[in-house]
Amino acid sequence: MSEPFLSVESVSASYGNISALHEVSLEVATGEIVALLGANGAGKSTTLNVISGLVRATHGHVRFDGEAVDRLSADHIVQRGIIQVLEGREIFRDMSVRENLEMGAYTRKDRAAVAADLDAMCDIFPRLRERIGQRAATLSGGEQQMLATARAMMARPRMILMDEPSMGLAPLVVEQIFDTVRTLNREQGITILLVEQNAKLALSVSSRAYILENGEMVLNGASADLKDDEAVRRAYLGA
Ligand code: ATP
């Protein structure tokens, strides 16, 4: 393929003397949804944190849209168009839904387009429109995840990194969240790297997937093939 939109090239990272990633590589093409799977502690969040500049790689490189970004600060990486939706959601709890969405667009000067995007996000997430004046802390877990995702979108990212959007949510709400992931990808052309413990759902929404084990990439392939792979089924799909 032509040069990937995002490439993680042989990246290692550690916390003090605990190694978290060992020469991990992955690629995401423009407009793709790619899943990153693995058990607790495999290094999934660390991989996202290296891409978004929250954790420094000790070895290897990250390239985005043709440029090395692994020496940039987290702020500069956001400016390049990569936004991470953090695990645990990190919304502004004392602000209203509307204020949270506006905060997502704080670096933008195009106020008319911001208002239009806010409206578009409320079309994608009707729950947020119904609760537009409500304090974010009083939203349900699923609504908070919707708000965190919509807030990330308000920055008009080119790529979003989603860290376990299903965490702590009821199955029906998880289905809704994944439906909106598909919608964002299809209607807004957003490229998505998705970290998930719910391998079944992640494989159903992504075109390709990577599997991390103990900080090393052990497998990757088309999601449809991985769904049928005997070892993957036994280890990650409970079958
Ligand atoms: P989970 O699904 O449980 O969130 P994960 O695959 O996202 O797991 P990471 O959070 O990337 O895994 O963690 C990888 C390894 O690095 C783990 O062994 C973890 O204990 C360790 N680790 C993560 N963050 C830190 C930190 N801030 N300080 C020390 N060790 C850390």
Image (cartoon, rainbow, N blue to C red):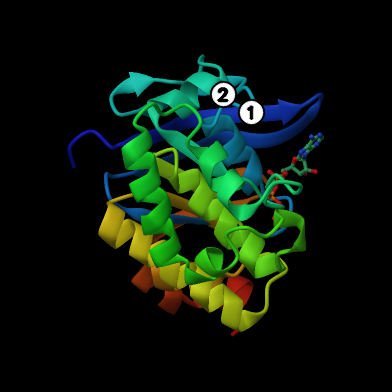
- Residue holding disc 2: 74
User: At which x and y percent is residue 100?
Assistant: 60, 46
* Kind of residue at badge 1: Leu
User: At which x and y percent is residue 149?
Assistant: 53, 53
User: At which x and y percent is residue 172?
Assistant: 58, 83
Q: Name which residue lies at 56% across and 61% down.
A: 146
Left-right relation of 168 to 17: left
* Kind of residue at badge 2: Ala
- Quarter of the view holding residue 136: bottom right
Q: Secondary structure at mark 2?
A: helix
Q: Which mark is residue 54?
A: 1
| Relative vertical location of residue 11 with respect to residue 88 in this rendering, above or below | above
User: Considering the image in quadrants, where does the N terminus appear?
Assistant: top left
Closer to the camera, 149 or 30? 149
Q: Would residue 232 be visible to someone looking at this image?
A: no
Q: Earlier in the sequence, mark 1 or mark 2?
A: 1
Specify the farthest residue to the left.
2
- Mark 1–mark 2 CB contact (< 8 Å): yes
How many numbered badges does the structure rendering display? 2
- Quarter of the view holding residue 7: top left
Asked if ligand 1 lies within 8 A of label 2, the reply is: no
Q: CA distance from mark 1 to mark 2?
A: 6 Å
Q: Name which residue lies at 68% across and 47% down.
A: 91
Q: Would residue 51 be visible to someone looking at this image?
A: yes
Specify the farthest residue to the top.
71
Q: Which mark is residue 132?
A: none
Other residues around mark 1 within 10 Å, as few (<14) / some (14–19) / many (≥20): some
| Relative vertical location of residue 216 with respect to residue 238 in this rendering, above or below | above
Q: Secondary structure at mark 1?
A: loop
Left-right relation of 116 to 151: left
Asked if ligand 1 lies within 8 A of label 1, the reply is: no
